Image (spheres, rainbow, N blue to C red):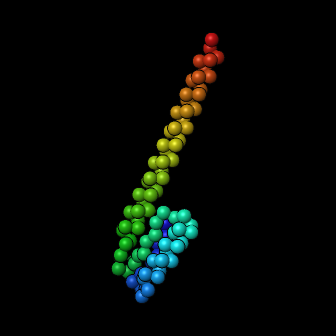
Amino acid sequence: MVIENKIDLIDKRFEHQQQLDEIIKKNKLFKGFQCSAKTGENIKMAFYTLFNEIISLSLEGLKKEQETFILKSVDKEKKQKSNCC
């Protein structure tokens, strides 16, 4: 995620938005925000978006870990059953 600060000082905001979009595309990022710490513009939205993305990625990672664990458990059970007879 890219956060551009001090947008309250920028006269040519549209040009900066185009540059921001290029950076996001070039670096395969998911989002970019133009913010102003001075006025508070887009600060909450940027942090909410970042927080939600972190949670989403964490949940995806947990799901993959659970799937891996389940597959390993099933493989272990099959081996134990095949060795017993």
The image quadrant where one finds the C terminus is top right
Q: Which quadrant holds residue 48? A: bottom left
From the viewer's side, name the closer residue of 33 and 43. 33
x then y, percent, for residue 50: 44, 62
Compared with residue 62, is residue 20 higher up or lower down, i.e. above or below? below
Q: Which quadrant holds residue 68? A: top right
Compared with residue 85, is residue 77 higher up or lower down, i.e. above or below? below
x then y, percent, for residue 9: 42, 86
x then y, percent, for residue 78: 59, 22
- Residue at 48% over, 53% down: 57
Most extreme residue toward the top is 85
- Residue at 59% over, 26% down: 76
Most extreme residue toward the right is 83
From the viewer's side, name the closer residue of 60 and 21. 21
- Residue at 38% over, 80% down: 38
How many marks the image carries: the answer is 0
Q: Which quadrant holds residue 52? A: bottom left
Instruction: From the viewer's perspective, tell me whether residue 72 is left or right of residue 52.
Output: right
x then y, percent, for residue 26: 56, 69
